[in-house]
Amino acid sequence: MNALAKRVGNSSFECQTFLNECFGPSVAANQTTARPDRRLELALISHVYLDTTAKLEYLFGASGQAAIGNRKLRCRIGPSLDTLAVANINDEKNPHFIDSPYFTGYVSVRVKNFKGITADGSKPIESLPYFESKKRLFSVQVCGRFKHEYTADDVVFGSEFEKKVILPTGSWVALKFANLIDPALKNDVYADKPWLWSPALCSMNIVNVVKAENPVTNAHPAESNPRTTVGGQTVTGPDTSKSKNVKLEVSKLTKSADEKPEPQLTKWAWFGPDELQESTQLLLSSREDSPFPSDGISERRKYFQNENARKEMVFKPDYIYNFEIFAPFMNLNTFDLTLGININLLQYLNKQPIRLISKSLSKNVPFYIIEFDLVDESENGTDDDDEQ
């Protein structure tokens, strides 16, 4: 074992560097020191890449602009697939507003070097000071409220597809990396409708909770028999036996949300130099003997990897939840995934977009959907529902 560890020593360094860039030094360190064998496991996976880069790049074909031709990135956001609307990427002062009988909130999407499609045909905002001191390639930020109660085990974030995808050679390595960082991640990428889900409190890079000032409105009828959590709390979710009212769903651009907030939300403050910070003081029902500090990102993620911990924690309509997720390995402008080599995902997606989704697993109710698609530049960014 020592000889093997010595052989992959440089790979271990490369792998640690990669983890630092993806998740920050504190989270990366937590993953490689929690178990003595984890660093070697990560190093071995990285070693596979380092030894076979040239061969794999030959197998995977073109990447970047050569792979996508004249296609451009279009982002659509909505509370469900029925109401997706084109959003303006990098317009961080004016987030996209969504509302439905299940969730209401602002969504802000940042993409480095964005040259894609805008909602009104205006010139795209290519980049932001946000990216200048970071190696991130994109960021998705949500400020919103659940209109019913859900356990943290029920609220997930991830992706799903309507049709099968073609898995590239070596895809198991990427999934292994993902599972090492987030052991709570589950997936079935071989299904007729592939999916990847992780509890939101495990997957989100930043979580920030504040008390709401006004009650939620236009909520879907609640179920008549509340459930009881592991910790004895009652959870009253939506009654999904009753049809939802699509007419209550809203997806639209905003102007000056920092000055005139939506009544159910708070003033939009996360733009420019004011970046979202971890603050989970109000996340748990009691902070006495809290299992993790209110600004502890890696501690929060590790704590909620435990299923019972997730089942004890309840998201409530009385609070506004701010989430942010970001990564340095996915270029959404071209769908290039970089994990030691560049893999262009366009050819593997079976003509489908990438959708980042948060939903209730038990109710199969979506809260918000962010869709990224590479479309021909002749498409003008209207909200026509394209056939996927």
Image: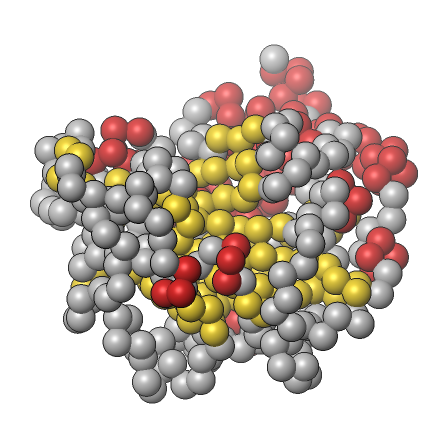
- Residue 14: % across, % down: 65, 40
Is residue 294 visible from the viewing direction of this image? no
Tally of numbered discs: 0
Describe residue 373's horizontal placement relative to residue 246 as left or right: right
Residue found at the very far top of the displayed protein: 1
Is residue 138 visible from the viewing direction of this image? yes
Q: Nearer the viewer, residue 141 or 216?
A: 216
Describe residue 233's horizontal placement relative to residue 292 as left or right: left
- Residue 356: % across, % down: 53, 51
- Residue 24: % across, % down: 48, 50
Describe residue 358's horizontal placement relative to residue 375 as left or right: left
Which residue is painted at 28% across and 71% down in the image?
265
In the image, is residue 99 above or below residue 343? below
Which residue is painted at 55% across and 36% down in the image?
195
Which residue is painted at 42% across and 49% down in the image?
366
Describe residue 67's horizontal placement relative to residue 137 as left or right: right
- Residue 199: % across, % down: 39, 40
Q: Nearer the viewer, residue 75 or 22?
A: 75
In the image, is residue 40 above or below residue 168? above
In the image, is residue 166 above or below residue 157? above
In the image, is residue 373 above or below residue 200? below
Identify the image quadrant of residue 174. Answer: top right
In the picture, the quarter occupied by the N terminus is top right
Which residue is painted at 47% across and 74% down in the image?
252
Identify the image quadrant of residue 234. Answer: top left
Identify the image quadrant of residue 159. Answer: top right
Which of the colour schemes (rainbow, by chain, secondary structure, one colour) is used? secondary structure
